[in-house]
Amino acid sequence: DVHGVDRTVLVQTSWSTWDNGYIADSVARWPDRFIGHGLLDPLAADNADQAVYWMRERGLAGFRFHPMYYPDEAVLLRRANDALWDQLAAGAAVVQFHLRAPQAEQVAQLAVRYPRLRLIVDHLGYPDPRAGIETYAPILALARFANVHVKVSDVAGRSREEFPFADVHPFIRALLRAFGSDRLMWGTGY
């Protein structure tokens, strides 16, 4: 209230448990102020049922996945996760991804399969200023899908420099050119 924030999205921390109860309780207590995003285990056999529970019973709007934690497997595209994606699409979920360029193809395949599912690449897609902009091409290529957005967040964490983090600016400019301002969103950690 002091800072004029009308609404905010609460996102379950990456290092937390799969229990989204605190986020869901907060959304239930202040539904006009908070929107909740939880975590789902992409390896859990019951993750489709968990998605239904957290969305229908507990009021979460979507979830965050971390395919970058599974570099040797296309974890999002596992056959066992087909029911999960069907449920997320049926529930009009918003889905965020912590990924790097090598995992972008998984999001591309989901964007094609579920064109109405809203997909967000979190933390700029983890660009590496030391590796150069050319290594970032798979993230920029996601702009061809109208249902993919990018969160401009954790800029300080991506940078190897002090504020204003100028080594990350070429990536942000490239995102702006590729996605346009309507498909970029601000997030914390700037």
Image (spheres, grey):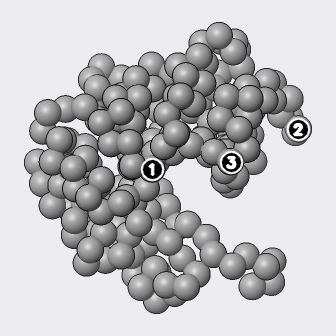
| Mark 2 lies on residue | 164
* Residue 115, horizontal then vertical, whole percent: 38, 42
At horizontal 69% and vertical 12% (from top left) the residue drawn is: 132
In the picture, residue 106 is in which quadrant? top left
Around disc 3, counting alpha carbons within 10 Å, would you say few (fewer than 14), some (14 to 19), or many (20 or more)? few
Apparent side of residue 181 relative to residue 141 in the rendered image (left or right): right
At horizontal 81% and vertical 77% (from top left) the residue drawn is: 3
Indicate the quadrant containing the N terminus: top left, top right, bottom left or bottom right: bottom right
Asked whether 147 or 140 is in front, the reply is 147
* Residue 62, horizontal then vertical, whole percent: 39, 60
In the picture, residue 9 is in which quadrant? bottom right
Label 1: element kind: strand
At horizontal 73% and vertical 76% (from top left) the residue drawn is: 5
Whether residue 169 is visible to the viewer of this picture, yes or no, is yes
Verify CB contact (< 8 Å) between mark 1 and mark 3: no
Tell me the CA gap for discs 1 and 3. Answer: 13 Å
Label 3 sits on what residue type?
Answer: Asp
Q: What label does residue 182 carry, if any? A: 3
Apparent side of residue 46 relative to residue 145 in the rendered image (left or right): left
Going from the N terminus, do you reach mark 2 or mark 3 first? 2
| Mark 1 lies on residue | 118
Around disc 1, counting alpha carbons within 10 Å, would you say few (fewer than 14), some (14 to 19), or many (20 or more)? some
* Residue 58, horizontal then vertical, whole percent: 31, 77
Apparent side of residue 45 relative to residue 153 in the rendered image (left or right): left
Q: What label does residue 89 carry, if any? A: none
Above or below, comparing residue 10 to residue 122 in the picture = below
Label 3: element kind: helix
Apparent side of residue 148 relative to residue 109 in the rendered image (left or right): right
At horizontal 52% and vertical 39% (from top left) the residue drawn is: 146
Going from the N terminus, do you reach mark 1 or mark 2 first? 1
Above or below, comparing residue 181 to residue 59 in the picture = above
Tell me the CA gap for discs 2 and 3. Answer: 23 Å
